[in-house]
Every structure is written in structure tokens, then in C-alpha cells.
Image (spheres, helix red, strand yellow):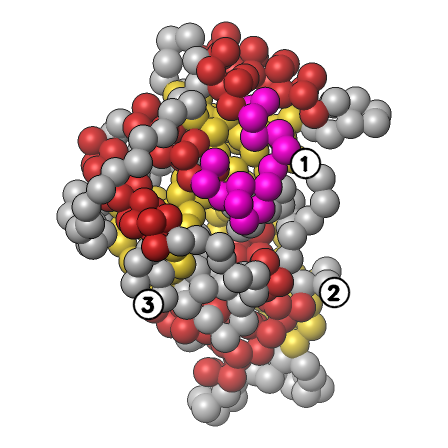
Amino acid sequence: MGTAFGTFGELLQGALPEEDGDFLVTLPVARWTMATFRPSRPGDAPGEIEVRPAHKTKALRLARMVADLATSRPGSPRGGLLTVSSVIPEGKGLASSSADLVATARAVGRALGVAMPPARIERLLSRIEPTDGVLYPAIVAFHHRSVRLRAVLGSLPAMAVVGIDEGGSVDTVDFNRIPKPFTAADRHAYAALLERLADAVRRQDLAEVGRISTRSALMNQALRHKKALGPMTAICREVGGLGVAVGHSGTTLGILLDATDPAYTRRVTAAARACAELSGEGPAGGSVAVYRTLSFGNVPGGAGSSVLPVTGAVAGSC
């Protein structure tokens, strides 16, 4: 068995002023994918790996790649059954595909005795599609197109995300083929935001995290416009939220709230009510979901993240 968490979009996503500069910063949430792999038993007829449900073709491809790493050992099974179960909605910018793949790599690797450290998983995933950084138990800066870790930023106190979905779905591979309209100034602005975010995570400054996340959502409008961003930002201000987070390559938007705030219950109730009105919740409308972010203890490298130093800053607010 293998598991992986999803994300609520990203705290920050853009491009830096360097080669292979496309990056994102994860926002892990308590939504999960679980994969199980049952290898063929000795004496079974030789067979292929099968996957359930059948549309999880990327997970199937990865399972075959991991199995290929094990076939050099005598007696290694040639087939098996991969089952992928997830509560993460697909095509919404919540890292559902990344979670499927990471959980699959872990499950098949454990079943076949193939070690699956993060670097090996990254190499395998890079052959399939751009991938989120959900294989690391932390908030990380991640180069999603080349599938490599940039920096472990650390962990934050628990937050809630009151989220809505604008509808439809986005294919990760197709989205990442779109030319990015970012100027040199935009790239330097993203670098400054990344520095600020790394510092905010070190200081556990949720207000600053919210400001940066909101700014990133606004800058992303040039790439994937979200019509509800303006109203969501207004709701955030009205309820005293930290900021707005979005699935930069997806369809979701959410309001960040400090789960340790004494006024949390009042704020989350007000935010959910306002978001329901905005999304038209009901038989003909969308729905509102409340997500809980994940906090991680003893995160290695959190205080000494390797974000490259740059100059300049961009202000943002809820």
C-alpha cells in the first residue's frame, strides 16, 4: 500500500529569471490517494499489470516502470493488480494526478522490494507528466515541469481553506504546453515573492503567507483567468481571512483562515455562507468544501531552505 496527500492549488506559482524557472510552492491538505498493489503469485499464469479504475492510465504506466526495475531479480512477478482510490477531485488543480502517481510508486515499490526514495520517484515521474511536490512531507518549492525539488521551506500552523470550484477540468500536460506570458519583470517579481514566502514560513507568519498567496493568484489571471477571484477576495476581506489561494492550473479558489484563531468558527461559517451564495450552491449550482491544511513536525531543512537570493519585492494583500 502507498499513500499521498493532495494540495489546495498552490501558495505561489510562476516562473523565475533562470533556465528551468517554472516553479510552484505546495499547500498540502488532508485529502488523500491510496494505492494498493497485489503482485502475481508464483504459479499464476504470466500476465500484465492491470489497474482499477481503468482510466488511471498514468498510474498504470508508472506501475509498469517500477516493475521493470524489479524484473532483473529471479522470481520477480511480471504482473499484478493496481487499485487506486482517491478522495481528491480530478482536473481541479488539487494535485490528484500527482498524488495518484506518488502513491502508486510507493505501493508497487514496497510490493516488489524496489526502494522508492524521492529522487527516484522524481526521475520516474518526469517521464510521465509535470508533477506537484506531494512526495515531500513539507511545504516545498518545486520545479514541476522538470520534476525536481528546489527547496524545503518547512511547515505552518493549521489553516482551513473554504473553497469553491468554477467548474470544468484542466489537463496538466495540456496546460503546461501553453506559452507563459511572463515578462522579465514578472519573473523577478516571482523570485522576490518566493524569498518572502520562504521567510514567512520560517517565521510562521500566516498573514504574510496569505498576502503572497493572494498576489500570486492575481498575477496568474494573465495565464488562467478566474472570474470569481474578485468576489472571493472581497469575501476574504469581509470575514477577516488571511488571503486567497487558487489552483493556478485548475478551477478551484479558496479563502485561507487561521484555524487557531479564537474567531475561527465565526469566520469559517461566514466564509462558507458567502461562498455558497457566490457559487450558487444548490441543485443548479456548485458546492463549497472546507479543507484542512497539513502541518508537519521535524521538517528537515525548513530553517535553512535553499531558495536563491534575489532582490526586489512585490506587495500583496487579501
In the shown orientation, is residue 25 left or right of residue 303? right
Across the whole image, how many numbered discs are drawn on residues? 3
Residue ranking furthest to the right: 283
Looking at the image, which residue is at 40% across and 43% down? 12
Q: CA distance from mark 3 to mark 2?
A: 37 Å
Q: Position of residue 196 (x, y in %)?
A: 25, 38
In the shown orientation, is residue 218 left or right of residue 49? left
Badge 3, how many Cα within 10 Å: few under 14, some, many 20+? few
Q: CA distance from mark 1 to mark 3?
A: 33 Å
Residue 198 seen: no
Looking at the image, which residue is at 42% across and 39% down? 216
Residue 177, by quadrant, is bottom right
Sequence-wise first label, 1 or 3: 3
In magenta, the rendered stretch is 218-232
Where 70 sits versus 189, above or below?
A: below
Quadrant assignment for the C terminus: top left
Where 314 sits versus 232, above or below?
A: below
Residue 166, numbered label: 1
Q: Position of residue 10 (x, y in %)?
A: 45, 43
Residue 79 seen: yes
Which residue is labeled 2 in the image?
Answer: 54
Which amino acid type is marked by label 1? Glu
Q: Residue 219 magenta-drawn?
A: yes
Nearer the observer: mark 1 or 2; the answer is 1
Q: Residue 33 magenta-drawn?
A: no
Residue 19, numbered label: 3
